Image (cartoon, coloured by chain):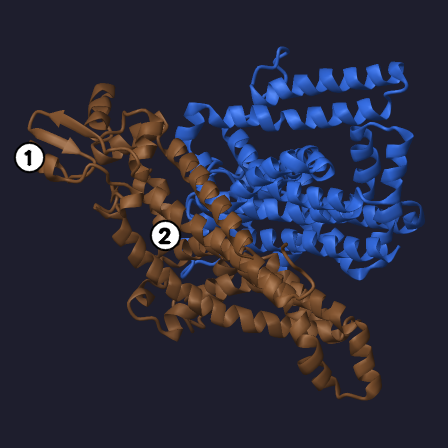
Amino acid sequence: MGLFILRRLGIMILTALCLTFIVFFMTNLYPNLEKLAKTQGNFRMSDAEVASYLGRNGYLDPLPVKYGQWLGVLPGWTVEVDEGMRGRCVQGTVAPEVLAAAPRFCGILQGDWGFSTVFKDEVSGIIATRLGLTGKLMFWVMVLMVPSALLVGVLAGMREGSRTDRTLSTFAITTTATPEYVSGVILIAVFASSAVGLKWFNGTATSAMEDATFNNFFLPVLTIALYGMGYIARMTRASMAEVMTAQYIRTARLKGVKFSDIVMKHALRNALIAPFTVIMLQFPWLLNGVVIVETLFNYKGFGWVLVQAAGNNDIELLLGVSVVSVIVVLVTQLISDVGYVYLNPRISVS
Amino acid sequence: MDIIGWGEIITRILTQFTPVWIALVVTFALSLIYKRRLGLYGKLFDSVIGMTGFALVMFWVYTGIFGGAFGWIVTHDTLSQISGLKNKVPGTPVPDAAAQGLYPYYLMGGDNLARDVFSRMVVGAWEVMKIAPFATLFAFMVGITLGLPAGYYGGKLDTFLSFLANLILAFPVILLFYLLVTPEIVLTGIPVYMAGVLFLFPIIFLTILFNSRFFTQPSKRNLYVALTLVIGLWVYLGIAWDADPLGLISFPPNLLVVFVAVVFVNSPTVFRIVRGLAMDIKTRDYVAAAQTRGEGPWYIMLWEILPNARGPLIVDFCLRIGYTTILLGTLGFFGLGLSPESPDWGSTINEGRKLLSIYLHPALPPAMALLSLVLGLNLLADGLREESLRD
């Protein structure tokens, strides 16, 4: 088991390196750098001005070198300009002595995530606050989604083919077929617009960042939860239906055990093994939903930062965002594999 | 003229869809009559869920073809703006319609640029039909061509390909879209190179398919392989490199980026499914029999394993078209790829959502359209799964 986790960790690091390199490569293509220079300076910059801006900010080094600097395995760039020295590890233009006193290496490994060009702030700080906000959103999504999905799945799966099953399955299919930008629009239209007139909830969640209430937070949470719910419910239903046909359930029924006891005591535990992995693997998908919902409801969390960073080619912020999301994806995969082994006595990794 | 009521709006919309109704009735009548001779497709008509899904899907397919390609159902031009109809409610009459020979009403109202919402929704179906099925098909060709050897041979090849697939799957889809589908990336030519690689797979797939089947009949094999190569490479040059020697086939560059991005995102999942199926099926007796007969590995993969994996693959194909539709909507929603005036559903929803708290009608029709199409595909997949499990 230890070796298995160690091997997985090795693959994870390799994957994270490859992915960040791809992001690095894509964002450092010259047209993208040019766009960055023009959004930072002005849109009528000449080619020479663009080149000088990029040179002053260390963007013109060869790609592997820049990647090494970002990682922190190569010393940060330094450039001599008219007014003094500029470098990766210092802010703005400084005297040579200040640069000499600054650390030579400043990358991810040293805990320096870089500086965001859009927000004019440390990347680590931005990501920490935004991740906190998204964490709040995700927590409530999980609180709403997991119990209701399991309930729907178990109720549908315990009597396969019954009317309850048909109704709940149709509901589950409908929610999986509704992407967040459709369900969000429909929910806002019905519950938040002045045209219908219900106005039960707020159509934006901007105020929920400071002070989340049922009014301003329920719609975004529901929108994300609905999309993931159908899938988990269908998995639970399938696994519940399979367990209910097993021999030991038949034995229990023939012994005369009450139906509710069979479901609660005998079937439920075995039926929940498969949904557990599915719930863990939903995290990457939820990340997608988060981006859409945060844009739709104007909730300035992690997904919103992703859109801002990508839209403005904010290289270091985008890299930070990718690192975090890749870690989230890979760690949930690992937990789902390990958890599956622990929950299911029939599977062993060795 | 006055604004017409909901009753008349619905009647008029149903009338506009007449060609679709006729086509649907004909399709269903023919399929129900001959359903015993039509294999899996015919069996679909035994399940209510499958039929409902099929009806929804075919409704949008016919709407797309008749409305987008033939221009029958649409009431107004999708780009023309008529002054005075900005954000007007459904059923608003068009001023001077009779004099200019226009349809007298905006059946689903006007959007914030005073364009007809109904016509844009109808043409939006055509935008989906042009991309989603083909992108899914291409993703399947890539996934099958790589997944079969990975599952069949296993070993280093499998480790390497699986690592690549997991790498792409670990990317948040939206980040990938933001990196791939921007005008700056189009300038660098990366999408063209990706298209150059991805679009080779269908040709490789078909060539190997025919070569392994007719290896013992050289005359037949040469004919099929030559035909595939000539037609395939011709289309390939036209679509991927925009270098068709005859100048007949070309592909708008912004559509190409969207196409490539969607194929790229979908193929790793297909790869994983095919690989899993191949690993399962290669232990069967008929594969061992073929190996004993001395068949080549590609013959076994494509003509023994693949046909026996068709059930799950067909079901996944339906689901994946729906997922591709969702992805296209996502692209439109973030304003990536397609031009801003494009009537595709994602862009229309994105435009409509900005005024959602006051005007519902520009955003809701495309949202409901997308929902019903994807729901139809899901139900269809469910029906197919049920029926293919039965035998």
- On the image, the x and y values in percent for residue A51 come to 24, 22
Using the rendered view, name the quadrant where residue A71 is placed: top left
| Residue placed under numbered mark 1 in the picture | A97
Q: Earlier in the sequence, mark 1 or mark 2?
A: 1
Say if residue B309 shows up in the picture: yes
Asked if residue B371 is positioned above or below residue B142 in the image, the reply reads below
Chain to which the residue tagged by mark 1 belongs = A
Say if residue B4 shows up in the picture: no
Question: What mark, if any, has residue B376 been given in the picture?
Answer: none
Using the rendered view, name the quadrant where residue B52 is placed: bottom right
Question: Quick one: SS at disc 1?
Answer: helix
B124 vs A61, left or right, is: right
Q: Name the residue nearer the viewer: B61 or A32.
A: A32
- On the image, the x and y values in percent for residue A172 come to 64, 65
Asked if residue A201 is positioned above or below residue B361 in the image, the reply reads below
Q: Colour of chain B?
A: blue
- On the image, the x and y values in percent for residue A45 come to 22, 25
